[in-house]
Amino acid sequence: MLNITKGKIDRAQKTVIYGPEGIGKTSLAAKHPDPVIIDTEGGTAHMDVSRIGKPQTWEELISIIKEVAATPGICKTLVIDTADWAEQLATTFICNKYKQNSIESFGYGKGYTYLSEEFARFLAACDLCIAAGINVVITAHAKMRKFEQPDEMGAYDRWEMKLSKQSAPLLKEWCDHLLFCNYQTFVVTSENDTKKAQGGKRVIYTAHHPAWDAKTRATLPEVVDLDFKNIASLYTTAAPAPVPIDVLNEKLFTAPFTADELLAFIKSKGHCKDAAALTDIPDKFITGWVLKYWKDITEAMATANTNENTEDKNNG
């Protein structure tokens, strides 16, 4: 039977911010609600922000994103700085996995097919954050490329993300908001018919133009000053992050132990000794210890139960 709903659905937002080097992409991303930044280029060194150490491998990056999604309350926005760096990690992972010297060594474009698959896996991990009520902001560098229209004479320069032709379309399709940051300049013709560029104000473009890609699913002017207050309305309706105790109760449904057994295990480790039930445990402890080390806790409790059963048999 069809389940038809009507009206807007509030959820976390997927945003891509790209532009030339030094325009202020990282600074803009860092002003999003309660951000945690995966800083790969040291762009936040001068900022008072929460950051995660630079992942050294592609698998480590995917694992970090999934861990953020599984840790309610850790942040309201995950910032990945930058997409082109992430793609380099994916390329290294693929080449090592298939023992190739470069992505071009595969032949027939097969390497880029693998790259597209891995980048899709990266975006799927980001979607886990969205499902958990965490906004995701991905920054990317921009490059200029000569673009030729297939049905017209001539060519013109066009700004694009500094990504492969396989990854860039995936990222553009995935996001709700594709924001292009650049310097706004005007060409002025003088009295002696010479042309001169003037201006240089930093702006955010939110709509498509022949010289760049941009979009938004919200209602924004086509160009605004590069200031977070001008895009803050995009994030006022993001779904709240799940309550930690609710997430824990969901995990207990499929866990091989009861809530009382989990509480006893927590107390045996010297934590929350005054708690009469899991609901008495602070959210910060649930998020920062129980959920964070859930896999380790499950394995430790399973081992303890196995040892107890073995002792009972021996005593019997």
Image (cartoon, helix red, strand yellow):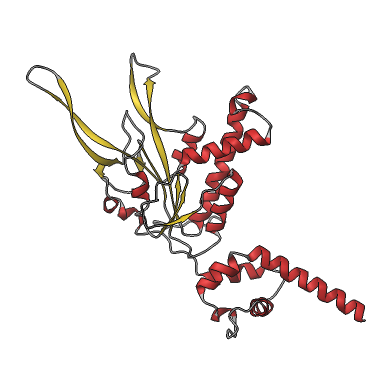
Percent from the top left, x then y, of residue 160?
A: 39, 31
Q: Is residue 273 left or right of residue 198?
A: right
- Vertical relation: 166 (above or below) 244: above
Give me the residue at 25% from left, 41% from top: 202
Between 42 and 72, the one lying in front of the other is 42
Q: Is residue 9 above or below residue 246?
A: above
Q: Nearer the viewer, residue 175 or 88?
A: 88
Q: Considering only vertical position in the picture, is 130 above or below 245?
A: above
User: Can I make out residue 201 in this image?
Assistant: yes
Report the residue that reaches farthest toward the left. 191
- Image quarter where the N terminus lies is bottom right
Q: Residue furthest front?
A: 46
Nearer to us in this view, 54 or 140: 54
Where is residue 196 shown, x and y percent of the image? 17, 24
Percent coordinates x, y for residue 24 in the rendering:
32, 44
- In the image: residue 147, left or right of residue 260: left
Residue occupying the point 59% across, 79% down: 278
Q: Is residue 287 left or right of residue 189?
A: right
Q: Is residue 155 above or below residue 269?
A: above
Quadrant of the image containing the C terminus: bottom right
